[in-house]
Amino acid sequence: MLLAIDVGNTNSVIALFKGDKLAAQWRTSTSAVRTADEYAVWLSQLMGLVGYKLTDVNDCVISNVVPQSLFHFRNLSRRYFHCEPFVIGPDNIPGVEVRIHEPSEVGADRLVNAVGAYSAHGGPLVVVDSGTATNFDIIGADGAFEGGIIAPGINLSMQALHDAAARLPRIAIQQPETVIGTGTVGAMQSGVFWGYVGLIEGLIARIKSEYKKPMKVVATGGVASLFEGATDAVDIFDTDLTIRGLYEIHRRVEAAKA
């Protein structure tokens, strides 16, 4: 079985594949200090709940944007799965050209999303990934990564508003009943929620205007579901896009070895 690990700035998603089928997936907060042994204990319990055990895993693929965490996940794979994990980078993904000035600067998560989106939806595409940051990534008609936009994520903006303004409370992000808030909480929710809808719609419109070719828009990420039904700018909401991208990269790597 394949264990696919997506280490994000805030959360990490770990998925288990049996053949080409997604058998299970779990989400945990990203930690730079959690050890391989701690991950193994956590994983063994969760895998046991769905009828699997650590010894069922014989391969591992990792996408990581937190350098301090990589050491522990490498050790997890080596110590408990007895295999060297495939760690995704800008120059080791078969079939993906990175068409920007400094390919080494592209985060692994953005490349994984490019592969996952293109394998499922073709191209050209805009992939909107809503997490700690909100990324707008451009995928060409041939699957190449062609650049994009990085904006602060919605949770980051809400946290900054609370931290910087002494009288503004910490609130949950949700779609308010009205655009015009009649209290502090409603006003904050409207500003953040509809402000991000405006950000998404505005940037997508500018991307399409500059790209000058028809493009599908695919949204993914931890908070993407918040915006489903709130905007017509997104064509497809695909919550499993990143995990599917990890599987597809692993499949291509194995095919290249054959």
Image (cartoon, rainbow, N blue to C red):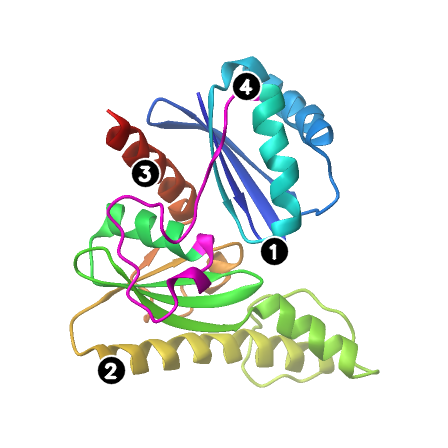
* Mark 2–mark 4 CB contact (< 8 Å): no
Instruction: Using the image, determine if residue 211 lies above or below residue 217.
Output: below
Q: Could you tell which of marks 2 and 3 lies nearer the N-terminus?
A: 2
Viewer-closest of 119 and 198: 119
Q: Position of residue 205 (x, y in %)?
A: 30, 80
Q: Could you tell which of marks 2 and 4 lies nearer the N-terminus?
A: 4
Q: Quadrant of the N terminus?
A: top left
* Residue at x 38% of width, y 47% of height: 241
Q: Identify residue type, mark 2.
A: Glu
Viewer-closest of 176 and 158: 158
Q: Which residue is mark 3?
A: 248
Can residue 204 be seen from the camera position used here? yes
Q: Report the span colored magenta.
A: 81-109
Q: Position of residue 90 (x, y in %)?
A: 39, 54
Q: CA distance from mark 3 to mark 4?
A: 22 Å
Q: Which residue is mark 1?
A: 9
Q: Identify residue type, mark 1.
A: Asn
Q: Identify residue type, mark 4.
A: His
In this view, the mark in front (2 or 4): 4
Q: Which residue is mark 4?
A: 82
Q: CA distance from mark 1 to mark 2?
A: 30 Å
Q: Could you tell which of marks 4 and 1 lies nearer the N-terminus?
A: 1
In which quarter of the view is residue 27 placed? Answer: top right
Q: CA distance from mark 4 to mark 1?
A: 27 Å
* Residue at x 37% of width, y 36% of height: 247
Q: Position of residue 153 (x, y in %)?
A: 56, 68
- The main secondary structure of the magenta stretch is loop
Structural crowding at the residue carrying mark 4, measured as other residues with C-alpha within 10 Å and reported as few (<14), some (14–19) or many (≥20): some
Instruction: Using the image, determine if residue 74 lies above or below residue 213.
Output: above
